[in-house]
Image: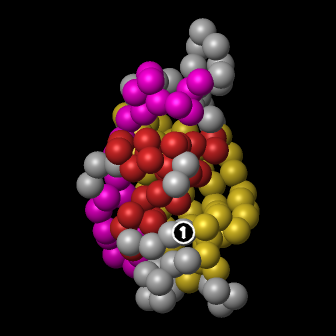
Amino acid sequence: MSVLTQEIQGYLSSVKRGEAGELSMTLAFPPEFSGFRGHFPGRPVLPGVCMVQTALVALGATHQTTIRLRRLVAAKWMAPVLPGEELGFTLRVKEGESGASRVKVVVTRASEKIAEFSIEVTGMPKGAGGS
């Protein structure tokens, strides 16, 4: 397990399950989070890949299995995330026919949408997602 994954697991608070395969959670990445190292010196900003990894870790923790990223389908980052800012993640899972599931992730800070991306993942248990 990567250091990044271990750190993210430590930051996850309770992940709440909603209807139709929806998950939601809030978390903040502290200044010492390894994802900030080198991105960028003197003005750390959370890399988008850390948000993607957070979604994978949350799915894996919720379903108690290893979730693997097959591909990033679409992504849009609208605002930078600084150390210590509380983020809300909402994940909507839709089961696919090819053994992969599609996950739409929306990341917010207060009421501002700061990122939205869709990923295709493998390893989701049958019946874990919405329609």
Q: Determine the residue located farthest toward the front in the rendered image.
A: 1
In the image, taking residue 130 as reference, residue 28 lies left or right, namely left
* Residue 78 image position (x, y, % from top left): 63, 36
Q: Residues within 10 Å of mark 1 (few under 14, many from 20)?
A: some
Determine the residue positioned at 56% across, 83% down: 95
* Residue 68 image position (x, y, % from top left): 61, 67
Q: Can residue 81 be seen in this snapshot?
A: no
Residue closer to the observer: 5 or 129: 5
- Is residue 26 highlighted in magenta? yes
Determine the residue positioned at 36% across, 42% down: 11
In the image, taking residue 120 as reference, residue 93 lies left or right, namely left
Q: Give the residues in magenta.
A: 15-37
Tag 1 residue: 67
Q: Taking 35 as reference, is 103 above or below it? A: below
* Residue 62 image position (x, y, % from top left): 36, 67
Determine the residue positioned at 32% across, 70% down: 18
* Residue 67 image position (x, y, % from top left): 54, 69
Q: Taking 94 as reference, is 70 above or below it? A: above
Q: Taking 102 as reference, is 99 above or below it? A: below
Residue 8 image-quadrant placement? top left
Label 1 amino acid?
A: Ile
Residue closer to the observer: 97 or 77: 97
Determine the residue positioned at 60% across, 9% down: 42
Q: Determine the residue located farthest toward the top in the rendered image.
A: 42
